[in-house]
Image (cartoon, grey):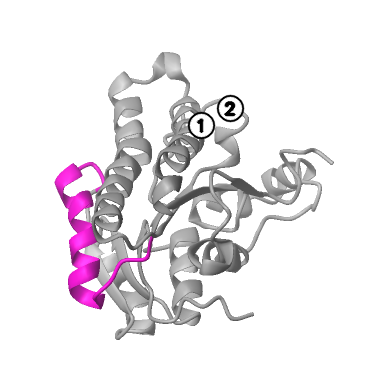
């Protein structure tokens, strides 16, 4: 399928690894140009080397609102346009809330909620002013649909992302700006390394997934490409769960 995004300018945060890198690769494969943002520029080296003319690596601290907002100008300066934003960067501290300093939750909300709001706002301001609408994709989590023990801050932040998506979609639909969420379940990424590398833990984890496997990172790419593309022009405020049936418990 031709997604019709050849030459598009897209910002992908948290692009150095895992789902962010997979999304960036999928968009580039469809012809888009990507500003790949992550805290560590070194971590982006491998990704950028795969398509140096189409991937612009950029160090960005998601806790710094000015750096996050500046991504919009960087994409326009580098590729001449901005068509979509993929808010993928996130942190997931593990621990019991009663034993955790609340500064940890504050940082989680800053990275997982405030940064996507800042970047979405900055992009929307450009799109509204230029009368050229775009697409925002917020990467949430199934933890934002059903809260998970030991992940109180993460669950709260990803739940907020889902509600933020709906609110912004309602506000910006009149401008043709679409805002959607992808809520991944368990994927074979570094975030699941402690489970993947422990056969007993892995077996227990897979019992909770009707598909009896974790997702492969490349499986999220086509969905992201669709939500960036004009093919999804009537799709907004939607939450796409991609988790092998775990939330539904089929």
> In the rendered image, is residue 185 in sight?
no
Q: Residue 11 at what x, y percent from top left?
A: 34, 63
Image point (57%, 66%), residue name: 226
First in residue order: circle 2 vs circle 1: 2
For label 2, the SS is loop
Instruction: Name the residue that disc number 2 marks.
Output: 147
The verdict on residue 40 being magenta is no
Which region of the structure is painted magenta? 62-84
Residue 83, picture quadrant: bottom left
Quarter of the rendering occupied by the N terminus: bottom right
Left or right relative to 213: residue 31: left
For label 1, the SS is helix
C-alpha distance separating marks 2 and 1: 8 Å
Dominant SS in magenta: helix
Instruction: Name the residue that disc number 1 marks.
Output: 159
Left or right relative to 200: residue 230: left
Image point (48%, 60%), residue name: 18
Q: Label 1: few (<14), some or many (≥20) within 10 Å?
A: many
Of marks 2 and 1, the one in the foreground: 1
Mark sitting on residue 10:
none
Residue 219, picture quadrant: bottom right
Left or right relative to 120: residue 201: right
Image point (42%, 39%), residue name: 168
């Amino acid at each position: 399928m031709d997604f019709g995004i050849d030459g598009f300018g897209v910002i992908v945060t948290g692009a150095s690894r895992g789902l962010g890198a997979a999304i960036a690769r999928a968009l580039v494969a469809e012809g888009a140009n990507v500003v790949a943002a992550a805290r560590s520029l070194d971590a982006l080296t491998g990704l950028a080397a795969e398509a140096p003319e189409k991937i612009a690596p950029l160090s960005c601290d998601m806790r710094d609102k000015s750096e996050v907002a500046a991504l919009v100008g960087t994409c326009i300066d580098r590729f001449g346009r901005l068509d979509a934003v993929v808010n993928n960067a996130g942190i997931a501290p593990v621990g019991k809330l009663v034993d955790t300093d609340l500064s940890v939750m504050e940082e989680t909300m800053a990275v997982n909620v405030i940064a996507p709001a800042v970047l979405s706002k900055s992009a929307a301001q450009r799109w509204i002013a230029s009368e050229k609408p775009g697409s925002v994709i917020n990467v949430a989590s199934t933890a934002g649909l059903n809260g998970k023990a030991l992940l109180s801050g993460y669950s709260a932040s990803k739940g907020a992302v889902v509600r933020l998506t709906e609110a912004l979609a309602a506000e910006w639909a009149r401008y043709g700006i679409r805002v959607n969420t992808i809520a991944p379940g368990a994927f074979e990424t570094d975030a699941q390394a402690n489970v993947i590398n422990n056969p007993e833990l892995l077996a227990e984890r897979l019992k909770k997934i009707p598909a009896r496997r974790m997702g492969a990172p490349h499986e999220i790419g086509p969905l992201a490409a669709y939500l960036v593309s004009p093919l999804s022009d009537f799709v907004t405020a939607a939450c796409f769960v991609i988790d092998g049936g775990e939330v539904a418990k089929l």
